[in-house]
Amino acid sequence: MTARIRSRIFVSFLSIVLMATVGLESKGAERIEQDWCSSVVVRPDRRQQATGKCDLVWSESEVAKKAGVVLMGGYQDVSAEEDRSGLPYCGGPYTHQRNAAYIKSIRALRPKGEEPILFAHMARSDLVSASHIQAEGFRSGFLVKTKTPISKVAESLRSDQSPDCQGACRWAFRRPDHPEEGPHNFEAATRAIDSSGPGPTHEEVVYYVSLRQPAQKIKIPHAAVANLTNPDYRSWRVQRYKRALGEGGYDAVMLNEKFAQYFGGGVDYWLGSSTCLDVSRCTGKPDTIFSAKPDDYGFAEYVAGWVAFARDLKAADVPYMVRTVPHPWLTNADDPSTPEVNEALEIESVLEGARLVLLGAGNTGPTLSISDWERDLSESGVRILPVDGRCGYAKKVSS
């Protein structure tokens, strides 16, 4: 990359967080009606209209005709024999076999002569869902630990008198209205964690918690947080990805990134932290947040694990895609606690090995345009598709 791009752009961490949030969420007064301002379609297999009939937003024929890249599925997806839901629900069952049937139908409808659609599975290497936790080979040592037991988190929620709680918030591993067997039931997963040592118990791990619905007073985990620096976890998960490619018919897996949740500067992302003193005062009202402070697992550790995971995928011949923004992660995302490592350069090395990089146009830095980044990254061998999260998620306007 050129010296012009390499010049450091120093901004405060608060500015970084604001750009990372506003750049992805600010949609303006009127939405531009197409996913990511490009041929990328996001989760067309899981997004239903508000009709109560499980009708998809996109028809299969529309996706087949207009899409170039389809990001589909989710972090809960497992093999059919591992699916424990046993119940019909919108978007389900969350299995690779169901996804394969969807992909097959789209490919059959693709107009002749058009370039094949690139299908990528939206897996989350940083999260372990309840179904994955109960799968063969899982070990509790794969998870990020915390010194704040979940019983203390539950106590804090019970005593939360903020407007969104008023003493009514509770922690649970399953909501009362959810079935005992289902994709959102974490009770069985806690037993699997406790029986799969050596490692932390379910009381001692960090969970990913949804705050998407303030009216929902019972807070449940969506997943447990994985320790990407653990080579045994990476080996187990990479093999599951490799198997998923065959079962689901995907062309690649998404190597998601959550840099903003770990990058330092005193801004934290867990219940009870400085940005989330109570449920009503979670800065920016994030959709999801950590249940407690991770123990010795910060930005440097997360990036090191993320980079190692990408290299493990490459070694196993598992193609991956990345969606990220260039600023600050390719400019000044260097952790001072690791003077021997430049995290920005490490992140860029992962992009160079990707099948495709969806590069966000929202955060390009104060002096560079998305065209500058596209040109310079392409010179380094990175295949780029510019996207813009400010467009929102909606149907494409007919031209």
Image: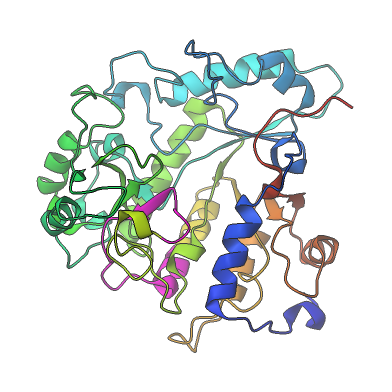
| Magenta region | 283-305
Could one spot residue 197 in this view of the protein? no
Compared to residue 156, the image places residue 122 above or below, namely: above
Could one spot residue 297 in this view of the protein? yes
Is 249 displayed left or right of 143 in the figure?
Answer: right
Q: Which corner quadrant of the image does residue 398 belong to?
A: top right
Task: Tally the marks.
Answer: 0
Q: x, y (%) of residue 142?
A: 27, 55
Q: x, y (%) of residue 164?
A: 31, 48
Say which residue appears at 40% left-offset and 50% top-offset. Answer: 288
Q: x, y (%) of residue 98?
A: 47, 19
- Model colouring: rainbow
Q: Nearer the viewer, residue 60 or 351?
A: 60
Say which residue appears at 47% left-offset and 72% top-offset. Answer: 263
Q: Which corner quadrant of the image does residue 330 belong to?
A: bottom right
Is 96 displayed left or right of 210 in the figure?
Answer: right
The quarter of the rendered structure image containing the N terminus is bottom right
Compared to residue 344, the image places residue 59 above or below, namely: above
Q: x, y (%) of residue 134?
A: 22, 36
Is 127 displayed left or right of 2 in the figure?
Answer: left
